[in-house]
Image (spheres, coloured by chain):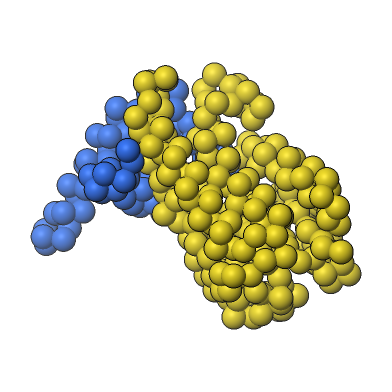
Chain colours: A blue, B yellow
Amino acid sequence: MTEENEFKKIEKEIVIERLRQTPPTFKISLGSEEGKFLSRDDLIKEVKSESRIGEEIINIQLGYLRAFKKGLFS
Amino acid sequence: MKCILFSRPKHDDTMEYLYHYSKELIKLSESIGITTINLEKEAANKKFVVERIISQNPDLIIFNGHGSSRTISGHKDEILFSCDDKNLDILKGKIIYSLTCSSASKLGIESVNRGALVFIGYKYDFAVGRDPDSEASPRRDKIAKFFFEPSNILSSFLIHGKTAKIAVNKAKEKMMENISYLSMTRDFPDAIHYAPYLYGNYAGLIIRGHEEASI
């Protein structure tokens, strides 16, 4: 596994762990088919399967963490 | 007289929310004497949208709907405009706000290349959080309002004749305020889990074309 792939794998694991901490009642609409709201388990499935929405979830979560670290939300 | 066209499908759960939150924009537009074309539910179809753009030449078009990097859709996901559309030229000189997923990514660029004055939209998916206690009723939803308030501020500023740049800056200010609240509040424990998705909307909201354009 290349260093880049290893890094992506770690990012994916971080996001899945964050999603596991989300309450089971959580619902979000995010470009899903038929305008359905996705549950926590749906989001985890999307990330695990590396779907287009899964990639978007990873980018959203990591983007938020980076912004949080920079102190943008105070 | 100024003219605004709204496309407002209502055929699935997410569209119900967009439909609900755009009601107040219709009222606002009408209340200040703007000619308001409200293409809602089944009327948010390609034939009607194209006909009304050609016949009434609206200054501002506000699309609510699903979308992709290359498309904007209407009722039952009929594609209203796409990058490959010969009709894209009818957007020439128009101010466009596309409350859809990802359409600012490629369709926004192509629209401006084909003559649209400005295209405001999202280069990533537009996220909407839902309050589990709301029973999917937009009216009762305490979470969704954090996602739609900034978008409605953007539309309101455009309707009032402010520039695209001012409208987007005001929307981003509200987004940041709401993200900070969701990230820090202890008013309800689930709030922080919605914050990243609103941040995704913040990061994705962009202007293609003439930032100083206004109606």
Q: Does residue B181 appear left or right of residue B40 in this picture? A: left
Q: Name the residue: 79% across, 42% down.
A: B27
The image shows residue A41 at horizontal and vertical percentages of: 39, 31
Going by the image, does A23 lie left or right of B42? left
Occupied quadrant, residue B112: bottom right
Q: Position of residue B47 (x, y in %)?
A: 82, 63
Q: Residue at x 66, y 80 (%)?
A: B115
Relative to B174, B75 lies left or right: right
Quadrant of the drawing holding the N terminus of chain B? bottom right
- Residue B48 showing in the rendered view: yes
| Residue B183 point in image, percent of width and height | 35, 33
Q: Position of residue A17 (x, y in %)?
A: 24, 34
**Residue B73 seen from this side:** no
Residue toward you, B107 or B146: B146
- In this rendering, the answer to whether B81 lies above or below A28 is below
- Front-lying residue, B61 or A8: B61
